[in-house]
């Protein structure tokens, strides 16, 4: 398969994935949110495994260094940015700085568990992916890919069955155990294992893939209706079997759809900027609501916007575009703040280049 085809389906999948994440946080609690949460985070962990496969043979310390640069630096930067937003809002409302409270908030963010974060709880994803990726790749070094996947699946299912746990591990390491199943599943599909090149498939193959993808997504929709709201970062899974089926079928459906779709500049842009959109869109949502409230003097602008049906399009437009503009500005001056410009990757054959290598 040509490099362009491989990059296209990965960019399509990751672009769709970040769009679903933002949409899932924009819509009100209900069936649509339940459906998106059934598979959007497993999809992201799966794609992270796919992109990790090209460099899976690198020494493990080098892999840890690479993930620390690309994940932990943005975690720290956007964590501090989120705390700064809290303090600025408090100062605007006339509350004096309270250093003990600020230190507690910093500790809560640093612990890396979503429900304990005072703001921008999506930041849990960065340390959780770091733990999942580094742990999974170490396991691969020790026992090989297939055995690592089997061990991770057993451990992940155990966490699902035992949840809710009596305590939460730092950096959402308990969620990372479940995420490792999907990460290692994606690793199986990365180089040298190749997916079919949809652009050169026969009409029959494309039709079959379209039908299977549709069936997978329809099955996920039915499962979400029965299983309700699930959330990997809260260790909330509902029925364990239904959770696993929904996450796998939904992920497979999006992957199939991504292979069928032509290359898209829009999805490629969302894919490239997903590492900035992910931690910023919640802050943008809050900013939009505050600005609308200041302009209209509505006591609860978010409730009014939601009631009038404006909140979802507003959040989608600004939650996607403002982080892209922010990334463009920062990348010109200090790309390291975004976790970029770090340790150089070992050259990979052109036929194995992936989305994040362009």
Image (tube, grey):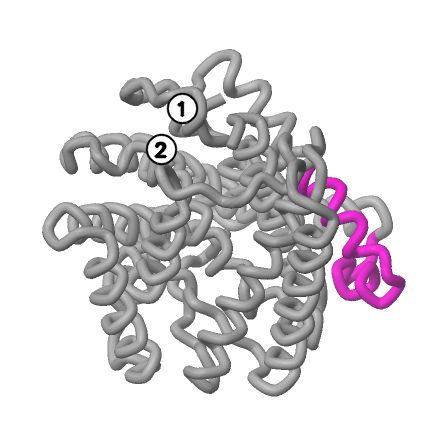
Examine the rendering and report whether any part of residue 92 can be seen. no
Q: Nearer the viewer, residue 204 or 211?
A: 204
Q: Residue at x 50, y 68 (%)?
A: 247
In screen coordinates, is 28 left or right of 279? Answer: right
Give coordinates of residue 145: x percent, y percent. Answer: 24, 52
Q: Nearer the viewer, residue 143 or 128?
A: 143
Judged from the image, the secondary structure of the residue bearing numbered disc 2 is: helix
Residue carrying label 1: 340
Instruction: Give the label on residue 70, or none.
Output: 2
Give coordinates of residue 354: x percent, y percent. Answer: 46, 31
Picture quadrant of residue 351: top left
Q: Main secondary structure of the magenta part?
A: helix
Q: Nearer the viewer, residue 48 or 171?
A: 48
Range of magenta residues: 297-321
Q: Nearer the viewer, residue 62 or 248?
A: 248
Assess whether residue 127 is covered by the magenta stretch: no
Q: Residue at x 67, y 33 (%)?
A: 322
Instruction: Evaluate if marks 2 and 1 touch, with contact meaning CB atoms under 8 Å apart.
Output: yes
Give the class, few, some or many, for how many residues have Cα within 10 Å of label 2's Cα (few <14, many ≥20).
Answer: many
């Amino acid at each position: 398969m040509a490099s362009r085809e491989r990059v296209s389906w990965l960019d399509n999948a990751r672009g769709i994935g970040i769009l679903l994440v933002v949409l899932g946080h924009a819509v009100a609690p209900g069936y649509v949110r339940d459906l998106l949460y059934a598979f959007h985070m497993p999809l992201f962990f799966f794609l992270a495994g796919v992109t990790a496969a090209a460099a899976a043979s690198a020494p493990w310390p080098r892999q840890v260094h690479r993930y620390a640069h690309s994940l932990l630096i943005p975690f720290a930067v956007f964590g501090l940015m989120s705390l700064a937003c809290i303090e600025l809002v408090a100062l605007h409302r006339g509350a004096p700085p309270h250093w003990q409270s600020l230190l507690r908030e910093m500790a809560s963010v640093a612990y890396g568990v979503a429900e304990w974060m005072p703001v921008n709880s999506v930041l849990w994803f960065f340390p959780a992916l770091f733990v999942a990726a580094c742990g999974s790749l170490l396991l691969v070094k020790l026992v090989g890919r297939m055995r690592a996947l089997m061990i991770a699946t057993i451990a992940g299912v155990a966490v699902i069955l035992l949840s809710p746990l009596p305590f939460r591990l730092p950096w959402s390491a308990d969620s990372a155990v479940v995420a490792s199943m999907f990460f290692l599943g994606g690793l199986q599909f990365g180089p040298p294992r190749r997916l079919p090149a949809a652009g050169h498939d026969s009409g029959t193959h494309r039709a079959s893939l379209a039908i299977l993808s549709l069936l997978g997504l329809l099955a996920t929709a039915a499962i979400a209706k029965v299983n309700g709201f699930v959330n990997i970062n809260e260790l909330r899974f509902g029925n364990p079997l239904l959770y696993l089926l929904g996450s796998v079928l939904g992920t497979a459906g999006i992957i199939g759809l991504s292979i069928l779709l032509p290359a898209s500049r829009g999805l490629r842009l969302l894919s490239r900027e997903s590492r900035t959109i992910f931690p910023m869109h919640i802050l943008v949502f809050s900013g939009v609501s505050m600005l609308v409230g200041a302009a209209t003097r509505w006591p609860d602008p978010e409730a009014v916007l939601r009631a009038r049906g404006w909140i979802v399009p507003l959040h989608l437009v600004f939650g996607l575009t403002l982080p892209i503009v922010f990334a463009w500005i920062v990348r010109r001056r200090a790309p390291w703040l975004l976790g970029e410009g770090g340790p150089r990757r070992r050259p990979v054959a052109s036929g194995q280049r992936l989305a994040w290598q362009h």
